[in-house]
Image (cartoon, helix red, strand yellow):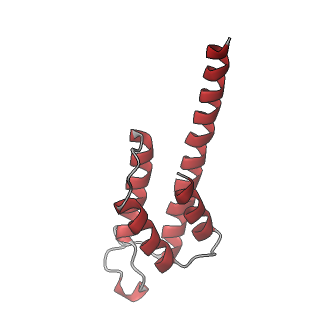
């Protein structure tokens, strides 16, 4: 899922605008061909909801409980990146420990 990590990092570090992130994330997520684990899907689905709630024009934000600003979308992306890295690190540690167990 490196493609999501790269995109998230680029957005969180402001290498990509919110509009670029929105367009690229939606394209990736809607065209995902790899089977995601339930946890991976849950993380990306929450981000999908936040991307869907993003409003590029602050003057058009009607419901601050639903509509997200660019700053709020960046916070969501940062949280998603942290969750993604957490599960990736734990999966690697789990896989390594089990590969050592089964290799003996």
Position in image of residue 36 (x %, y %): 41, 44
Position in image of residue 73 (x %, y %): 48, 68
Q: Visible in this render: residue 79?
A: no
Position in image of residue 46 (x %, y %): 39, 55
Identify the image quadrant of residue 7: bottom right
Rendered residue at 43%/54% (across/down):
44
Given residues 25 and 64, the one toward you in this image is 25
Give the answer, above or below, for where 85 lies relative to 8: above
Given residues 43 and 36, the one toward you in this image is 36
Identify the image quadrant of residue 66: bottom left
In the orientation shown, which residue stands out farthest toward the left? 62
In the orientation shown, which residue stands out farthest toward the top? 104
Left or right: 57, with 98 as reference point: left
Give the answer, above or below, for where 17 lies relative to 44: below
Left or right: 84, with 62 as reference point: right
Quadrant occupied by the C terminus: top right
Left or right: 79, with 68 as reference point: right
Give the answer, above or below, for where 64 lies relative to 90: below
Given residues 80 and 28, the one toward you in this image is 28
Rendered residue at 65%/27% (across/down):
96
In the orientation shown, which residue stands out farthest toward the front? 103
Rendered residue at 60%/62% (across/down):
6
Q: Visible in this render: residue 55?
A: yes
Give the answer, above or below, for where 50 lies relative to 54: above
Position in image of residue 19 (x %, y %): 47, 79
Identify the image quadrant of residue 13: bottom right
């Amino acid at each position: 899922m490196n493609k999501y990590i790269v995109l998230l990092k680029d957005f969180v570090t402001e290498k990509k605008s919110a509009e670029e992130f929105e367009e690229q994330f939606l394209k990736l997520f809607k065209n995902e061909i790899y089977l995601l684990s339930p946890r991976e899907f849950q993380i990306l689905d929450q981000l999908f909801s936040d991307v869907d709630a993003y409003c590029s024009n602050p003057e058009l934000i009607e419901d601050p409980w639903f509509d997200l600003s660019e700053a709020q979308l960046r916070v969501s992306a940062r949280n998603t990146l942290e969750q993604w890295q957490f599960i990736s690190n734990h999966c690697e540690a789990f896989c390594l420990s089990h590969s050592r167990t089964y290799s003996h």
